Structure formats: C-alpha cells, structure tokens
Image: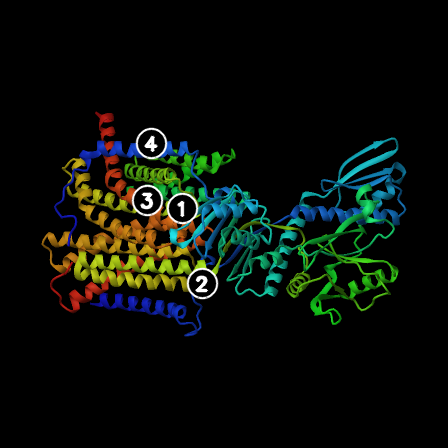
C-alpha cells in the first residue's frame, strides 16, 4: 500500500508541474513563464549565415601599414626607389644600401609587427619583402569576425526585431535568426552593408572622363555616384576622380540621425563626430577651402560639396536623394559602425508567415487524426486497459509540451512530426506490458499476479529498447541544424515521457484499481 | 480483441531461404538504383542551390512560370507542383546560389506576376551556398557515423551483457577510425571502414546477437535509401533525421525479439536453437505487429495530412518502419541460426 501512495505522489507532482509550465502557451500572461518557442519554419522569419571575408581585413591592415611606412620614410628622409603593396598581403621596399641602417631603425621603432620575408641586394639597392606573421594575421581575422558580430548585433537591435538570435558559427561565420520578420529584403540590406564611410578630396585638376580613357593619375581613384531617377527609374552613374588618401572615416562618428531638409523637404542624415574626429574635420576643411570634399560610402560617392569655410563643431550631413526609409537605414548602419570586412550571405532560409501558420495547422490536424486513430484502436484492442494506455498517451503529450517550455526549446515542423511519431511509439511500452500480462493471464495467474509479472518482465526490455532511439535522437541533437534539432528534442522528450507514463503512471492506475478498489478481473 | 492469436506458430525459420532471396533482391535493386542514378540525389541542403516555393492566386501553368523565370535569367531552373494540384503551389529549384541580390525576391515576384497573369506569393526561399552544402553533407555523414558507432558499442554490451568486450569494441573502433582519419579520407569512407571493422569485431568476438542486429540495421538502411533513390526523391537534412530514427526504431524491435530468445534459451534449454528462435519470434509477433501498426497509423496520417514540407520525411519513415518490422521478424533472428550452423560445421 505504501508503494502505491509513493507512486501517486510522483505522478501527480509531475503532472501538476507539467501543467504549470504548459498553460502559459495557451493562455499567455496567466503566470510569468514563457510560452513554447516556435521555430522559424512555424512562425515565419529569416535564417541567415554570413561569411566574413576576413582576408580583406588583413589586406587593409597591410594597406594601412604601407601608407604609414611611406609617410614615416618621407618624414625621416629615408630615400627609396620603391615602396609598394603587392597583391598578396605583402609590402615590397627597395632602398639604396646607405639608407639601410636608418630604415631598420625605423622598423624597430614603428613597425615591429612586420616580418622580413625575403631580402636581396643588387647594384647597391636592397630589395626587401615584408609580410605579417601568421599569429598576427590570425589575430586580425578573429578580431574582424568578433567586430562584425558586434556590429550586426547593434544594427539588428536598432532595426527592432524581437528575440533575434545572432551568434558566431565556426571560425568566420555568423548565424542570424530573425523570427517573424517580413521585410527580408530590407533586413538583408541592413545586415550585409559594409557601411564604410570615408571622406576624400576630389581631384579637380584632372577630368574624370579623360582619366577613364587614359588611365588614372597616380594617387587617385575613380568612384561613381549612383542615382536613380524617381520618374524614369533609370540609374545614372556619374564618375568622380578622387585622391585615394582617406582623410577621415566613420570610426569617429558618435551619432547619425535622419533629418528633413526644410528647403527641399528631403530627408538627409546628419552625423556627429567625437572630439578627435571634429578636430580632424576642422583641419581638413580649413586646409581645403573652395575644394570639393567627397562623402564616400562603400566605394560609392554620395555627394561632393564645395567646402565654403572651415567647419568646426564636428557635424556634417550626408545627402543623396534618399527616401525616408533609406535615410533611416543609413543612419542605423552609421550609428552601429562599419563592418571590418565585407560579408557574404552563404545560406539563407526564409519562410513567409502564411506558410508557417499552414504548417502549424497541418501539423496539428495530422497529430489530432493520428492520435485519435491510435486512441480508438487501443480501446478496441485492449478494452478498459486501452483507456488507461490512452490516458497515458494524453499525459505524454502534456509532458512533451511542458518539456519544451521548461528547457525553452524550439518547436519546429519536424518537431511536430517528432511528437506525432512519439504518439505512435509511446503506446509501444504499454503494448509490451499488456501483451505480457495477457500471456501471464493465459497461464492461469490472477489479475494481480499477472499484472506484477507483466510489469516486472517488460520493464527492462522497455528501458533497453528506448535507449537506441534516444542514442539516435541525441546524435541528431548534436549535429542537427534548427528544424532537425527540434525533431531531436521532441523525440527525446517523447521517449523519456513515455518511459515515465508506461512504467510509473499506468502502473499506479492499475495498482489502484486492483488493490484499492479490489477489482478482480482485468479487462485487457 | 486480438489480431495475432496467442497460439500462433508461423514457421519463420523455415522460410529463411525465401526471405533471404527477397532481401538480397531488394538490396541489389537498391544498389543498382544508386549506381544508375550516380549516388543519392541530393537536395539543395547538400548540393547547394536555391529553392523557392511560390503560391499563385489562381491556376498557373508550369510553362508560364518558366517563361517568367527566363526573364530572371533562371532558364535552367526546374519547376514542379508542390502538394495538392488545387493549391496552385510550385517549387522552383536552381543550382545557382550566389547571385541573390537584395532585390531578388521582389523582382522575381513581379516577373512571375506578369508571366502568369496571377498574383504570386513567395512563401519560402532557401539558398545554400556550395561550401555550406559540403559542410552539411559532412555533418550529416558524421551524424550517421556517430549513431552507428554508439549503437554498435551499446548493442555489443547490451545483448551479450559483456561490457568489458563492449569497451574493447569501442577502443578498437575508435582506434581504427582514428587511424584512417589520419589519411584525410572522406567521411563516407570512414563510415564504411567503421562498419566493416564492427562486423569483423562482432565475428571475432563472437557477438552473434549484436551481429544479427547490425546486419538487420544495415539491411534496413540500404533498402530505405535504395527505394528513395528508385523513386527519385531527394536527400535533405530531414531525410537523414528520418534515417537515424529508423536505425533506432528498427533496433528497438530487434532488441525485444532477442530478449525473448535469451529468456526462452533458459526456459527450453533442451530444444534446438531453431525451435527457440521460431517460438520467440512468434511470441513477440503480436507486439511487433501492433506497435508497428500504431506507429504506421500516425506516420501515415502525417504523410497524408502533414503538408508538402514534411511529406518526404514521413515517406522515409513509412518505408523504414515497414522494412524495419520485416527485418526484425525475418532477418535479424535467422542470422543467429546461420551463425550457429557455421559454429557446428567448424566444431564438427
């Protein structure tokens, strides 16, 4: 008798806890526990995997060092015949032999990170190649991915998506999950944009058109302003010849906001620099009055106004025929900062909200139909005992739902399939026990003895048989991606809960009926 | 009610020749189909590419959709109906994966709208880059590999109740696989190595129950994969999940039959092994059929009512459950007997 009451306490406690955790899903706000998470395939949304082109950051690091090196050599009056960045992340330096000492001095003082890759001497000229050691490049790459992750997180926060999931995946990938998002195009634009803001001087000494044909003058580059005509929808590209040297970048930005121009009623983005940025901006504008300063974003010229006077105070504006939405997104990316390297979308899975709700509906219908068929079948086959097995089945479903809520796991379409599969498999344990009881009854045992023998003999087998399914489910959980993980979760929960209901719950019910209610015959 | 009467006595062992030929035939057909189709047909999860699910407001022809796709430079995309004909839903698949710019879906929508004279809704877009496809392939193979590894270790310990031997198994398997992985071979090759090593170890250590179980398992997987290939269905991540579930499920049945054999071996130690195996399979037959039946009921309802997304997954489970049940009854146990016959020949 003692045994029975112990079982009942466990059973009732488990069911009570399960109900406490499950209810908020159907009646939100009942008590403060979260509802069951729905996967992107059920609620709609976007799953993106980005790859950070980290090699590019190494190249730009070398580029920066190259620029600095030239600057320092000029400053220290070191004569050179050649200082260039090579295609691979390398710098080549050719200097007369008598300059070598001064040059090596400079390296020691300012460029400790550079590694000498090769050195040869010919006709009094020393040719050297430098690159960065692997540890340094690896560090740069890791930092680039970290920074990209942070930047994307900021952008998405500002964009306003509820419960986004952004995390690093592997060495240089970023996984982004945006549930419930409908404007996927805009989100992709926002996330994928490098948003590198640069200020460069326009080279007015040369005509960009002749430069197009005859090759670029040294130290310049050709970039375009791209505008879309609002009426004809045609894009117009205007070439600009710019000095390649970047005078100021978006690194010093503290704020970017959308404003409406009172004169033309057009949106523009106003930007604010920090103290250092403001100083640089003041110096540039002071030194280049009457020249044109191009505002370049991601290698596209947005505008190139003539500097009328020195600008102090550290604020500027970016104009460029924006729609309000474009201006808003530009402000977001500028505020969140530039990506350290370009990113590529290498995996994308988007599910529209209507497809998601269809999936939920169809999943529930097949669960209901399959479940009812099994319930009816069990009653026909095992009569009264079938009802007890069906009771166990219903408790099972509640337990799986509660498990999902407790572990804050995500329910996906394959996850629903896992629950449906569990409905079919959960009765297995009861079938095993019932068949065993029938066998024992046919040997002439009393109901109580047959029951005890049935449970005792079947228990170990049931435990064992479920381990294999659990192994498969756990491996799937480890290796699966989103939806498959959902399947692994519901399958494992199903296996565990069916073990509980078959071995503890139904036993408690049978014992109650046979011992406490003194039932003599078992309807099985 | 009872479907299988208690006194049932099918001559399972007596039919082992017929069963053996049937299984061999199915395996040969499966392998031939795989060779003929040049391996399994990979979905975009594994091959990389783009999949777009589009629903139209009214009836649209595949030709009209194709002409719309042509305007988008997607002339070589394949188009097929998805789910019920009356739903006007289609799947477009291309091998291209990289050139999806931000405006892609809105451009595609307007191209399709004008080509089919219908309002279209892009309900699902899946793009998998070639590198991601390769990674997912590797991940899926690793999942299969680890499932087989853990299960081989588990059943060698469990069936024979010799956990020391199971430990030896684990060490030998891991060692062999590690040795081969040093040569940078593909994961598929590693799986083959692991399976062969497992079979050899079972043989050498005379773990006959484990041997029977693992042979039945390989049998199920080959036939399920073969039938999938025969019906030209695609392998995607969910299908791999279904395969692993089948592995677990098929073993479940086998374990229960084997448990009964061991129990009966103690009970009727004077009878021949053939008799005991036959009796045990018959005793558990009712349970085996019943459980398969309830599982089939629910999976079938998922197959019919679950919608297109889960259709192939349910189909793989359907095949797997039928084959798994068949192999638990007709394949796994006769192998024990085959082993016994071999032992007798060797000793006498």
Q: Earlier in the sequence, mark 3 or mark 4?
A: 4
Image quadrant assignment for residue A332: bottom right
Q: Earlier in the sequence, mark 1 or mark 4?
A: 4
Residues flagged by tags 4 and 2 on a common chain? no
Dot 4: chain letter: B
Q: Which residue is mark 3?
A: B320
Circle 3 — which element? helix
Tell me residue B139's x, y (percent).
47, 44
Tell me residue B158's x, y (percent).
31, 44
> Disc 1 and disc 4: Cα gap in Å?
22 Å
> Disc 2 and disc 3: Cα gap in Å?
30 Å
* Residue B45 shows in the view: no
Dot 2: chain letter: A
Image quadrant assignment for residue A193: bottom right
Left or right, A139 with reference to A247: left
Outermost residue, front side: B117
Residues flagged by tags 1 and 4 on a common chain? yes
Q: Which residue is mark 2?
A: A37
Dot 1: chain letter: B
Circle 4 — which element? helix
Which one is in front, B95 or B182?
A: B95
Q: Which residue is mark 1?
A: B239
Tell me residue A240's x, y (percent).
79, 52
């Amino acid at each position: 008798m003692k045994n029975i009451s112990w079982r009942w306490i466990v059973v009732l406690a488990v069911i009570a806890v399960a109900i406490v955790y499950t209810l908020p899903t159907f009646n939100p706000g009942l008590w403060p526990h979260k509802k069951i998470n729905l996967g992107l395939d059920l609620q709609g949304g976007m799953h993106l995997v980005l790859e950070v082109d980290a090699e590019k950051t190494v190249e730009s690091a070398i580029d920066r060092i190259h620029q600095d090196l030239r600057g320092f050599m000029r400053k220290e009056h070191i004569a050179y015949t050649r200082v260039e960045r090579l295609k691979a992340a390398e710098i080549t330096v050719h200097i007369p032999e008598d300059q070598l000492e001064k040059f090596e001095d400079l390296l020691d003082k300012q460029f400790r990170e550079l590694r000498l890759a090769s050195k040869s001497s010919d006709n009094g000229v020393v040719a050297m190649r430098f690159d960065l050691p692997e540890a340094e490049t690896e560090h740069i790459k890791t930092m680039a991915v970290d920074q990209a992750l942070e930047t994307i997180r900021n952008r998405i926060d500002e964009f306003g998506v509820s419960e986004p999931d952004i995390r690093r995946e592997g060495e240089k990938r970023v996984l982004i999950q945006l549930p419930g998002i409908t404007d996927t195009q805009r989100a992709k634009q926002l996330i994928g944009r490098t948003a590198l803001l640069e200020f460069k001087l326009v080279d007015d000494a040369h005509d960009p058109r002749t430069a197009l044909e005859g090759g670029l003058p040294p130290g310049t580059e050709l970039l375009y302003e791209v505008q879309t005509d609002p009426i004809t929808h045609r894009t117009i590209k205007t070439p600009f010849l710019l000095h390649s040297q970047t005078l100021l970048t978006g690194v010093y930005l503290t704020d970017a906001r959308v404003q409406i121009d009172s004169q033309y009623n057009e949106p523009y983005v106003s930007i604010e620099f920090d103290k250092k940025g403001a100083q640089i901006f003041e110096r540039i504008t002071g030194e280049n009055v009457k020249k044109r300063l191009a505002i370049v974003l991601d290698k596209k010229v947005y505008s190139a106004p003539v500097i009328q006077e020195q600008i102090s105070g550290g604020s500027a504006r970016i104009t460029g025929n924006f729609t309000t939405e474009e201006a808003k997104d530009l402000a977001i990316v500028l505020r969140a900062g530039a990506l350290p390297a370009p990113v590529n979308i290498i995996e994308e899975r988007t599910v529209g909200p209507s497809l998601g709700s269809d999936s939920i509906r169809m999943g529930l219908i097949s669960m209901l139909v399959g479940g009812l068929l099994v319930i009816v079948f069990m009653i026909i086959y095992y009569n009264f005992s079938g009802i007890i097995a069906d009771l166990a089945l219903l408790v099972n479903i509640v337990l799986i739902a509660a498990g999902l809520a407790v572990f804050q796991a995500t329910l996906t379409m394959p996850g629903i399939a896992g629950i449906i599969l569990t409905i079919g498999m959960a009765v297995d344990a009861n079938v095993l026990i019932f068949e065993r009881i029938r066998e024992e009854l046919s040997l002439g045992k009393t109901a109580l003895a047959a029951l005890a023998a049935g449970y005792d003999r079947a228990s170990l087998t049931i435990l064992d048989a479920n381990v294999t399914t659990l192994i498969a489910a756990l491996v799937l959980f480890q290796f699966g991606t989103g939806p498959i993980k959902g399947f692994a979760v519901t399958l494992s929960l199903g296996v565990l809960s069916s073990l509980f209901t078959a071995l503890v719950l139904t036993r408690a019910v049978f014992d109650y009926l046979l011992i406490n209610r003194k039932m003599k015959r078992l309807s099985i | 009610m009872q479907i299988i009467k208690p006194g049932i006595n099918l001559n399972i062992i007596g039919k082992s020749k017929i069963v053996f030929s049937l299984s061999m035939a199915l395996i040969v057909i499966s392998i031939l189909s795989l060779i003929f189709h040049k391996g399994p047909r990979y979905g975009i999860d594994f091959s990389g590419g783009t999949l777009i699910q589009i629903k139209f407001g009214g009836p649209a022809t595949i030709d009209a959709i194709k002409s719309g796709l042509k305007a988008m430079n997607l002339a070589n995309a394949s188009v097929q109906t998805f789910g019920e004909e009356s739903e006007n839903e289609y799947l477009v698949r291309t091998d291209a994966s990289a050139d999806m710019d931000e405006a892609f879906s809105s451009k595609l929508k307007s191209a399709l709208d004008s080509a089919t004279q219908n309002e279209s809704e892009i309900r699902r877009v899946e793009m998998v880059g070639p590198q991601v496809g390769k990674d997912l392939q590797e991940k899926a193979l690793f999942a299969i590999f680890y499932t087989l590894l853990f299960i081989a270790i588990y059943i060698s310990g469990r069936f024979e109740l010799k956990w020391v031997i199971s430990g030896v198994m684990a060490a030998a398997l891991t060692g062999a696989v590690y040795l081969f992985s040093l040569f940078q071979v593909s994961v598929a090759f590693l799986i083959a190595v692991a399976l062969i090593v497992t079979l050899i170890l079972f043989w050498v250590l005379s773990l006959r129950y484990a041997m029977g179980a693992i042979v039945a398992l390989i049998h199920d997987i080959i036939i399920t994969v073969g039938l999938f290939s025969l019906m030209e269905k695609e392998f995607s991540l969910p299908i791999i999940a279904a395969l692993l579930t089948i592995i677990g499920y098929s073993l479940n049945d086998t374990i229960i039959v084997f448990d009964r054999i061991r129990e009966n071996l103690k009970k009727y130690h004077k009878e021949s092994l053939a008799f005991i195996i036959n009796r045990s399979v018959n005793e558990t037959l009712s349970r085996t059929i019943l459980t398969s039946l309830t599982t089939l009921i629910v999976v079938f309802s998922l197959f019919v009512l679950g919608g297109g997304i889960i259709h192939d997954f349910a189909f793989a489970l359907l095949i797997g459950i039928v084959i798994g049940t068949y192999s638990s009854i007709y394949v796994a146990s006769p192998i024990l007997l085959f082993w016994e016959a071999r032992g007798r020949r060797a000793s006498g």
